[in-house]
Image (cartoon, helix red, strand yellow):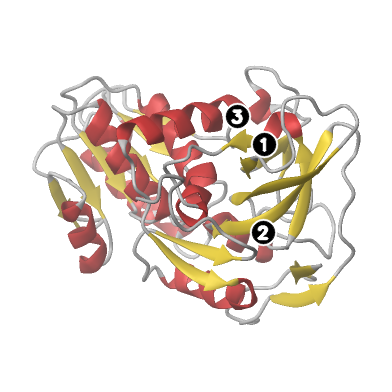
Amino acid sequence: MKAMLLKRIASLHDNPEPLTLARIPCPEPASDEILIAVSACGVCHTEIDEIEGRTPPSFLPIVPGHEVVGRVVKTGARVSRLALGDRVGVGWIHESSGDIDENISDQFVATGRDANGGYAEFMTVREDYAYPIPECFTDYEAAPLLCAGGVGYRALKLANIQNGDVLGLTGFGGSGHLVLQLARNLYPDSEIYVFARSTKEQAFAMHLGASWAGDTADMPPKPPYAIIDTTPVWRPVLAALGFLRPGGTLVINAIRKEDTDKQAMASIDYAEHLWQEKKVQTVANVTSHDIRAFLEVAASAGIRPEVRVYPLEDANKALHALRSGHIRGANVLAIGQAMNRTINGD
């Protein structure tokens, strides 16, 4: 089968093509696993963290990718819930303990980091960690829902806001544009402020219903009750802490942060950034329940991911576009036969 392989850790700056197109054996599902013919796989910033070694893969070479959509083409002997032909998705959680806190379990296995992922024509996963895709989404639309959406859903829960509370989103990529749509639906009376470094991202946020959009360093109209940070860097974290209202919560939704501007945190001021019972909450991975629940909510709320599609062979280009920040919504790789229209043809 065709796959994009990561063979060594390197910065994207030093190695502009970190992934190599190769032919590798097709995997065989274990007794409790399914084999998926992959049609689409989203491109997430966590892939960059893996490539550059901030969250290094458990082995090399490895097939990255953890926003996977495809169809079941083979089942293990003990598989009972899924059948041949079912359309399913796989997220960052490849397997874990199954407990309520499986996202922080030492049994957590990450798709595309600790097990081969979806930048390939086929992949295997336990059936408990494969999720039926609602019919209203195309394969390309469904892909970012499986990480950017699922982890964003968890971040919004951890923000613990009520309808009418002001919510801030700093960084406006694949996750931010989905969380904005979700929050608009769940909290119709809440003002939502978006902090983004590019004017195009700010305009996109306003198009999707943001109440205000500005730079990551711009003072918002009101102090938010909570701010969700999805950036890979530190300056927006410091700025967000200063913007929060007393008692507010900063939710950092990132697997890792880059060190490029880490020194900015040396200027943190207790009275300005932390006092008055402000809270910092991190998001650690995602549970299978989060993904399953979010897919249902996304379908009922009419959330529509905006995607740009690249062929599998252009995965390196898609990663560089993501790194530059000049994207609208999410990047997705086209791999196999995708369902590009909804089941009813709309």
Question: For this view, does 209 lie left or right of residue 73?
Answer: left
Q: Are marks 1 and 2 in contact (CB under 8 Å)?
A: no
Q: Does the rendering let one see residue 108?
A: no
Q: Answer above or below: position of 183 versus 18.
A: above
In primary-sequence order, the first of circles 3 and 2 is 2
- Pointer 3 local density, CA inside 10 Å: few below 14, some 14–19, many at least 20: many
- Depth check, mark 3 against mark 2: the one in front is 3
The image quarter containing residue 16 is bottom right
Q: Which residue is mark 1?
A: 130
Q: Which residue is mark 3?
A: 287
- Depth check, mark 1 against mark 2: the one in front is 1
Provide the secondary structure element on which disc 3 rests: loop
Q: What amino acid is at disc 3?
A: Thr
Q: Position of residue 64 (x, y in %)?
A: 70, 59
Q: Position of residue 164 (x, y in %)?
A: 15, 24
- Pointer 1 local density, CA inside 10 Å: few below 14, some 14–19, many at least 20: many
* Residue drawn at x 58%, y 50% as measured from the top left: 67
Q: Which residue is mark 2?
A: 50
Q: CA distance from mark 1 to mark 2?
A: 22 Å
Q: Position of residue 290 (x, y in %)?
A: 53, 28
- Furthest-front residue in this view: 344
Q: Answer above or below: position of 154 versus 232.
A: above
Q: CA distance from mark 3 to mark 1?
A: 12 Å
Q: Are marks 3 and 1 in contact (CB under 8 Å)?
A: no
- Furthest-left residue in this view: 221
Q: Does the rendering let one see residue 115?
A: yes
